[in-house]
Structure formats: structure tokens, C-alpha cells
Amino acid sequence: MSKSAFDPDQQNNNLASKTVAALERISQVYRLLLWDHAKELGLSPIQIQLLIFVGHHKEALCNVSYLAKEFNVTKPTISDAVRVLFQKGKIEKTYSETDKRAYTISLSPAGQAIVAQTEGFADPIQEIINKYDAGSQAQLFTFLSEIIQQLQQSQILTTQRHCYACRFYKKNTNGAFCNLLEQQLRQEEIRLDCPEFSLAE
């Protein structure tokens, strides 16, 4: 008998398989929503994702090497996307003073306009989640954040800006504590993408 989560017989007898299939369906929705914007603007989905990321993250994270890890693709794939965005005037490059081959990426005014048009592509999903009460949302977030943590520990997800991987995070008798914020963290306050993240040794 097939053990694939995409086999209906397996799903009907295994809740974990059914959940995997459900998450895959949701991932399809993200791709469809992103493609709709991409087609309208004459950009690829990865190009739009790059612009949105650069628009919301600090300069140190906006280079080819880091972006390849962030999106789990090769450096040549990111380099090609960056080249096209630069040619179209959507981004600007700032070259390193010590290594002229290295550069960071920032948005041009045209790139900022694209981000303003596209960064809400996942709003239909958020609107559905907002219909649930705070307790249900917290349960869902706990479940998903723990899966993300385990995917990172397995090195399937390569980037980590998650509380659990941060040097400021610690567990105590009351749960989670952030040494940077100097406060206890409720489960729903755990961050997946923290601007102050510093990788634990």
C-alpha cells in the first residue's frame, strides 16, 4: 500500500497525511495569487518575492548569497532575477568598498511602487484567518511555528530568523523568554522573522 500523503486512501486513514495534503493545497493558493500579480506586471513570481523581501528587510540581508538561502534556490537563479530587475529599473545596487564583486540591493522608486502593488497578494488568506478567534489563531500559529522550527533543525529550511534559533531566546519555568526585549513571550509572540535576530552558537 502506498504511503504517499497524496494518495487519497492514505489520507483517509492517516491524519498526518491529510494535514500534509491540506498544507500543499494552501501552498498552491500562494502560488496562484502570486502568479496573478506576476502576469499583470510582466515579472516572475521570484522577482516579485525578491522585491517584497528587499522592501521589508535590512541591507545586510539583501545580497545574492543570503537571498539564495532565503528562497532555497541557487545563487545563479537569484543573480538572473536580480539582473532582470536591475535592467528594468526596479532595484539599485550598492557595491562593497572592499570587494567590487559584492553588492547589496535596494529598491528604486519603481521597485517601491511594485511592492506597494503586490505585497498584499496573500491578503485573501489573512482575511480568512482573521475570521477565527484569538485562541484558534494562537493554536494554528503554535502548530505551524513548531513545524518550521523542526524543518530548520533538519536543514530543509536554510534560513533562520526564528526565536527558537536566536541567542536571545531561552526557556524558563514560565515558558519562553527574550533576553533582548527582557520579557516573557507568550506563544503567539514568538517571531518567525525577527529584525533583531542573532543566531545562537
Image (cartoon, helix red, strand yellow):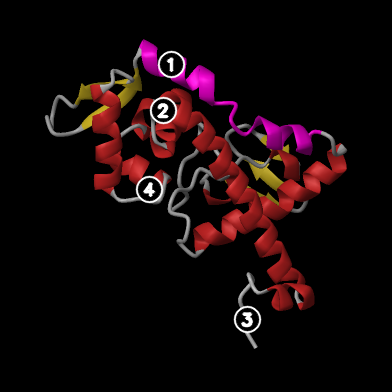
Left or right of 48? Residue 15 is right
Point 66% across, 30% down: residue: 123
Point 39% across, 30% down: residue: 43
From the image, tell me which residue sits under label 1.
112
Callout in the foreground (4, 3): 3
From the image, tell me which residue sits under label 4.
69
Sequence-first disc among 1 and 2:
2
| Residue 51 marker | 2
- Say if 192 sits above or below 38 in the image: below
> What whole-number distance in Å separates the C-alpha atoms at marks 2 and 4?
16 Å
**Which class describes the residues within 10 Å of circle 4: few (<14), some (14-19), or many (20+)?**
some
- Specify start and end residues of the magenta stretch as a single range: 109-130
Image coordinates of residue 170 in percent, x first then y, are 62, 49
Q: Which element type, helix, strand or loop, lies under badge 2? A: helix
Image coordinates of residue 85 in percent, x first then y, are 30, 27
Sequence-first disc among 3 and 1:
3
| Residue 3 marker | 3
Are the residues tagged 1 and 2 within 8 Å (C-beta)? no
Single out the residue that lies furthest toward the top.
109
Left or right of 14? Residue 197 is left
Sequence-first disc among 4 and 3:
3
| Residue 169 marker | none
Q: Amino acid at mark 3?
A: Lys
Sequence-first disc among 4 and 1:
4
Callout in the foreground (2, 4): 2
Comparing 53 with 125, the one in front is 125
Comparing 123 with 141, the one in front is 123
Point 30% across, 41% down: residue: 78
Sequence-first disc among 2 and 3:
3
